[in-house]
Amino acid sequence: MPKFKSALEQAAAQNEWGAFGRPLFLDDNARALSRVGVVDVGSNSVRMVVFDGAARSPAYFYNEKILCGLGAGLRETGLLNPEGKERALSAIKRFQKLAQSMGIPPLTAVATAAVREASDGPEFRDEIMQKTGLQLWVIDGEEEARLSAQGVLLGWPDARGLVCDIGGSSMELAKVGDGKVGERITSPLGPLKLQGLKGGRKGIRNHIEPVMADLAEVMGTDHKRIYLVGGSWRAIARIDMERRGYPLHVLHEYRMSARAVSKTIQYIKENDLDAIRGKTGTSSARMALVPIASEVLRQLVRTFKPKEICISSYGIREGMLYEQMPASVRARDPLIEACRFAEQKDARIPGVGKRLHRFIEPIFRARAYEKMRLIRAACLLHDVTWRAHPDYRAEVCFDNATRANLGGLSHKERIFLGVALLHRYKNSREGTSFSHLIDMLSDKEVQNAEVLGKAMRFGAMIAVDAPDQIAKMDFFPKKKELILTLRPEAVDLFGEVSEARFMSLASSLGAKTQVKHAKH
């Protein structure tokens, strides 16, 4: 009996990937990165992350963080915090055991400001090696900045501006643009280090201001966008969401204006921190550093005057993964690779997304590249939630698109993708609970997403595996005419339900229809 070949396998054999390119997970170089574990020993926290999946846009197979506070008291004593050392050592022992049980390659571990600055840092590094067998690489500030910036590039390939990574004991800056990391610098502006300063809030401000001015002298102030990396920045961004009543609680690619940052810093100052912590789910250890971090952020924005402040959930750990990628892998679109991996893992027939895209593409020919990549992503994801209960499948699609771990996707693009996938399974949005999110899109964007969803809904109905081989659609925007040409083998497949979905698509386009029959 011949072995059934999926559409993906057939395309691999024929080398006909077109705009999609060959799937990254079929590449041997990418397979070597399919599961990679890294450990980040920071001044405030120690974290292990195990990445898994499509190497260009990995999922978090395992993620654990311990707030050890290694850098607490470093300014006064010059030593690592004793309790922090015990907690960090205990965490690393656990991480090593976990990594062994997962059967992954040896962990890659780096230590940052606290370990490199403390007089007992080398001793602590040796103790970790002796008691756990883990080689801890102590990196300097510029290298820390480079890795953090690479993490931003992993999820944000077209990032251009200034990356600012705040840790417990230091703050790093790096220029990014054209997929590369440029000039880098480090500073002692971590909130743990600033905790010991005298003079309260005013004393901290007086200390920060000249340091920030020196940083601007080196890095320049002509950066339209600043990318914020680090737990303290994410905590402040989550508070900004709470203050604004922002509906989509996804921190990656969350964006703030300088004015919004100023208002949020004032909000932090005027409100009870425990109450804020309860509303935002921030840990007490992290919240204790937020007031100091907010003073650093205030001066950062005042000094560099960016037009936009963006949050990146990707940082040094993702940068360590990016470091191991060959150039051919780095060049891939993280959104498309993540969607392709999801299709391969979860779709009924992997590879159909490419064929569905080919079938519906004539409707969207005039769209810009950014819109076309969203259309490709939607086609790849159109069937990955088929196991959900039919009554909730549309809602699961929307939730998956808006909250999944996808890089290279703005918040509005997430919602656009969610609306499109919702309409892949449901003709109408009435009765869904997502109106507060959908309101973030313009009427035109919602209408375009609806058209995309209904086009996928029709294409998936007329043929399960290869709609592009049995039928062809053409759309003439000026004439407002949608033409469907059926090959002989498609005539019986164009039944009542298929026709109803075709007419629904035409209605969303505001187009009249014509159905033609090809002779062969």
Image (tube, rainbow, N blue to C red):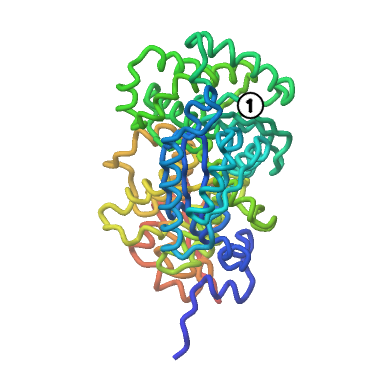
Which residue type does callout 1 highlight?
Ser
Task: Tell me the residue at 62%/33% (across/down).
Answer: 163
Q: Nearer the viewer, residue 153 or 295?
A: 295
Residue, disc 1: 187
Quadrant, the N terminus: bottom left
Q: Nearer the viewer, residue 234 or 504?
A: 234
110 up-or-down from 56: above or below: above
397 to the left or right of 217: left
Residue 465 visible to the viewer: yes
Q: Residue 462 appears at what percent x and percent y?
A: 42, 66
474 up-or-down from 494: above or below: above
516 up-or-down from 233: above or below: below
419 to the left or right of 387: right
Q: Residue 513 appears at what percent x and percent y?
A: 47, 54
Task: Tell me the residue at 52%/20% (across/down).
Answer: 194
Quadrant, the C terminus: bottom right
Q: Quadrant of residue 386?
A: bottom left
Q: Nearer the viewer, residue 291 or 425?
A: 291
Q: Quadrant of residue 211?
A: top right
Q: Residue furthest bottom?
A: 1
Please rate how many residues cluster around mark 1, counting C-alpha atoms within 10 Å: few if below 14, some from 14 to 19, many from 20. Answer: some
322 up-or-down from 80: above or below: below
Q: Secondary structure at mark 1?
A: strand
Q: Residue 36 appears at what percent x and percent y?
A: 53, 57
Q: So how many labels did they put on this image?
A: 1
Q: Residue 490 appears at what percent x and percent y?
A: 45, 72
Q: Nearer the viewer, residue 263 or 145?
A: 145
Q: Quadrant of residue 371?
A: top right
Residue 376 visible to the viewer: no
Task: Tell me the residue at 64%/19% (across/down).
Answer: 212
